[in-house]
Image (tube, rainbow, N blue to C red):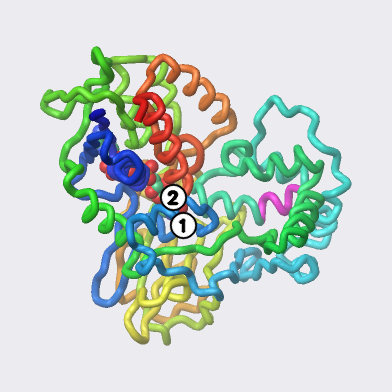
Amino acid sequence: MKHIAIIGGGIAGLSALHFLRHRYGDRCRVVLYECEDRLGGTIGTDRIGGFISDWGPNGFLDRIPLTLEMVSELGADELLDPADKSAGKRYIYNRGRLHEISPSPIAFMRSPLLSLKGRLRLVAEPFIRKRRDWDNDESIFDFVSRRIGSEAAATMVDSMVSGIFGGDSRKLSLEACFPIMRKMEYDHGSLVKAMIAKKRAAKKSGKSSSGPSGPGGQLTSFKNGLNTLIEVFAERYGDAITTGCPITEIARAENGYRVVREGGAAVEFDAVICAAPAFAAADMVAGMNQSLSKLLASIPYASIVVACLGYDRQDIAHDLDGFGFLIPRRQGKRILGSIWTSSIFSGRSPEGMVQLRTMIGGDTDPGAVELSDGELLDIITEELSPVLGLAGPAAYIRIFRYKRGIPQFLVGHPARMSQMNDLLRDFPGLSFTGNAYEGVGLNDCVVRSEKAVMATAKHLGL
Ligand SMILES: Cc1cc2nc3c(=O)[nH]c(=O)nc-3n(C[C@H](O)[C@H](O)[C@H](O)COP(=O)(O)OP(=O)(O)OC[C@H]3O[C@@H](n4cnc5c(N)ncnc54)[C@H](O)[C@@H]3O)c2cc1C
């Protein structure tokens, strides 16, 4: 019987626990240590007075089969709650009003979201020369400006990057954040040519290919909010979980690793999967390997605030007919965008009320997380009012702050990851999972945790 420790009880640690127990349950004994008194990490849900509000993530895209397979193995399919189809409609705020992002190229070309010059530059994309220097990473903004023009980059991609990563498109790595886009240029020389090739291939195989404007896949959550998934994990694997147990150190032991708890008690394991945030993992390995610790500590995190506000339906003039909207940074607003929670998922607000989820902060506005509730509410009300036609105050207010919320994959991140992989060759049986390495979304965490479990199983001969 092999003895394995998992450190961290967010989605990454919990999915590693699931894969180990589900696939190798009779050949290993697993313990998960979580420092807080609750599981879930950035996932949490408040259920108050008929409102259901997710603290951090509000769903995952259903395009990665592994996440759905895991949900199914947990017996939780029936609890899934896919977003309403109308939530496919997304908006960008530009020059004082909302513009719908149409997946139809003709409708998009007619939309005044970009100037005529910006639209003409965009259609020139297939004629732009393919990049020659593939050895160096580049920022998302540089890539998009090069391919479709700086206006489209500053309007469409900048807002998407702040919505997904809370990040600055001028600083984030294309290869780490959008590897598919890089591959599209690498393989086809053009994004448009790559999309045409994808559509042709999909037609040939009888499958549908997703439109160019959406991220691909349907946003999916759980009835009663995303924390439902965490509750399912807790119920299924409670016997393997120790909460309220901060880990301070991972050290080498004769046959594996010694995991030290706050207070000094230590337990030896044959293998360790560390699913704590990179900055916490850096502290844990500092005594064992300085280079690894420094690499982990060099991954920065952006702060972010999520404000879930409930309004009387009659107090909002806008139809709220879609997913919500994002705001390019150059529009000079502090809010990053607003998601119309009660239009996306059913049962998120009581009869006659609606719920909006507004993000503020991110890498370009680190001071926002320090503002008081009152200051945040004033900014949100002032900036939402002209866009949505607010006629009354929020009747329900929940504000969630993340000082180190979303890891930032800066230009050069892929090189840092290969350096980390090289260092880890000297530490067989030790792996790192979570959102700080290969992707920030829930799906990315699940995929990376499965890889960590497979590497652990191979090392231990399970
Ligand atoms: C505001 C916000 C909105 C987001 N929205 C989405 C979204 O809609 N869709 C999506 O796919 N992704 C979204 N994300 C990203 C997603 O939430 C994260 O990628 C994912 O939840 C991270 O999971 P994790 O397990 O890697 O880390 P975490 O959730 O941070 O979990 C790490 C765990 O480790 C524990 N820990 C830390 N130190 C120690 C220690 N010393 N000992 C023991 N335990 C320790 C922590 O307490 C925590 O429970 C969002 C993130 C944020 C912040």
Does any portion of residue 361 appear in the rendered image? no
Q: Residue at x 28, y 19 (%)?
A: 256
Q: Earlier in the sequence, mark 2 or mark 1?
A: 1
Q: Is residue 403 left or right of residue 145?
A: left
Tag 1: Cα neighbours inside 10 Å, few (<14), some, or many (≥20)? many
Give residue 80's position: percent from left, percent from top.
40, 66
The C terminus: image quadrant: top left
The N terminus: image quadrant: top left
Tag 2: Cα neighbours inside 10 Å, few (<14), some, or many (≥20)? many
Q: Which mark is residue 350?
A: none
Question: Looking at this view, is 329 or 131 the one in front?
Answer: 131
Q: Amino acid at mark 1?
A: Phe
Describe the element under mark 1 as helix, strand or loop: strand
Q: Which mark is residue 442?
A: 2
Assess whether residue 154 is covered by the magenta stretch: yes
Is ligand 1 less than 8 Å from the beta carbon at label 2?
A: yes
Question: Looking at this view, is 339 or 257 the one in front?
Answer: 257
Q: Amino acid at mark 2?
A: Leu
Q: Which residues are magenta?
A: 148-155
Question: Looking at this view, is 317 or 157 the one in front?
Answer: 157
Q: Quadrant of residue 59?
A: bottom left
Is ligand 1 less than 8 Å from the beta carbon at label 1?
A: yes
Q: Is residue 419 left or right of residue 278?
A: right
Cα separation between marks 2 and 1: 6 Å
Q: Which residue corresponds to mark 1? A: 60
Give residue 146's position: percent from left, percent from top.
77, 42
Give residue 34's position: percent from left, percent from top.
23, 40
